[in-house]
Amino acid sequence: MQLLVVNPNISEPVTDLVAAEARRVASPGTEVVVRTAASGVAYIETPLEAVLAGAAVAEVLAADGRTADAVVVAAFGDPGLPGLKELLDVPVVGITEAALATASLLGARFSIIAISERITAWYRDCVERHGLAGRLASIRSLRDPLRGIGTVQEDFGPELVRLANEVVSRDGADVVVLAGAPLAGLARAVADRIPVPVVDGVSAGVAQAEALVRLAPGAARAGSAAPPPRKDTAGLSPALRAALRREPRP
């Protein structure tokens, strides 16, 4: 099995975190190919930045995703995910949808720990889009500016653990979701300091992508994830144009 894991942020240190966690959790025999978006922002906090990231991920999928058995979009908020599912005939899994689905299996109510206050409104929208608003206990976030997106775990580890315990004691969370690619791998390190299950989006995304490949549910030929109709295009890369038309890669 080959999984393509894409970091929609342009930060290579975050890609390194994602790659390490994805390969750690992948099953024996699964090849994990990791790519970084070629354009966009260092880390995504707003819907506009997510639009930019979604376009960048589409280019990666067109170039490298057509030989993969499944794709994992490794940024919380799943930038561009509904449209990206139309591009390929294999499962395309976002780490948000995977984390929320996993949390829903582990408890009645979950809370999300985010790395910035600005990002929380978008995350709340994501939860609502998945129909899980009634199971969201809270979203709490770091308040201090980030020194570097690749060092969030080192800079704010104790504060992230404090927030996780706070959502349990004050908000009634049965499960904690540590949100965002910069926190990849942290759940594994701090699980013994939090009294409820802790979900890592990258781990959940890889595990669920593998499960979907093994289940072999078939490709979407109708419905919301069906391929878009063929039409004239302009300004697209040859790879993306070919992927949209289901043609061989140029």
Image (cartoon, rainbow, N blue to C red):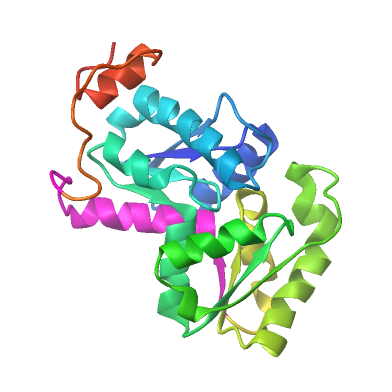
Residue 250, placed above or below residue 186? above
Q: Can residue 185 be seen?
A: yes
Question: Which one is in front, 153 or 95?
Answer: 95
**Residue 132 placed where, x, y %?**
44, 73
Residue 77, placed above or below residue 85? below
Residue at the image point whose x is 29% and y is 29% from the top: 66
Residue 214 magenta-highlighted? yes
Residue 165 magenta-highlighted? no
| Left-right relation of 129 to 120 | left
Residue numbers of the magenta segment: 197-222
Residue at the image point whose x is 67% and y is 77% from the top: 192
**Residue 208 placed where, x, y %?**
36, 58
Question: Which one is in front, 49 or 92?
Answer: 49
Q: Can residue 200 be seen?
A: no
Q: Quadrant of the C terminus?
A: top left
Residue 108, placed above or below residue 56? below
Question: Which one is in front, 220 or 198?
Answer: 220
Residue at the image point whose x is 40% and y is 65% from the top: 130
Residue 69, placed above or below residue 201? above
**Residue 234 placed where, x, y %?**
35, 13
Q: Quadrant of the N terminus?
A: top left
Quarter holding residue 80: top left
Question: Which one is in front, 11 or 145?
Answer: 145
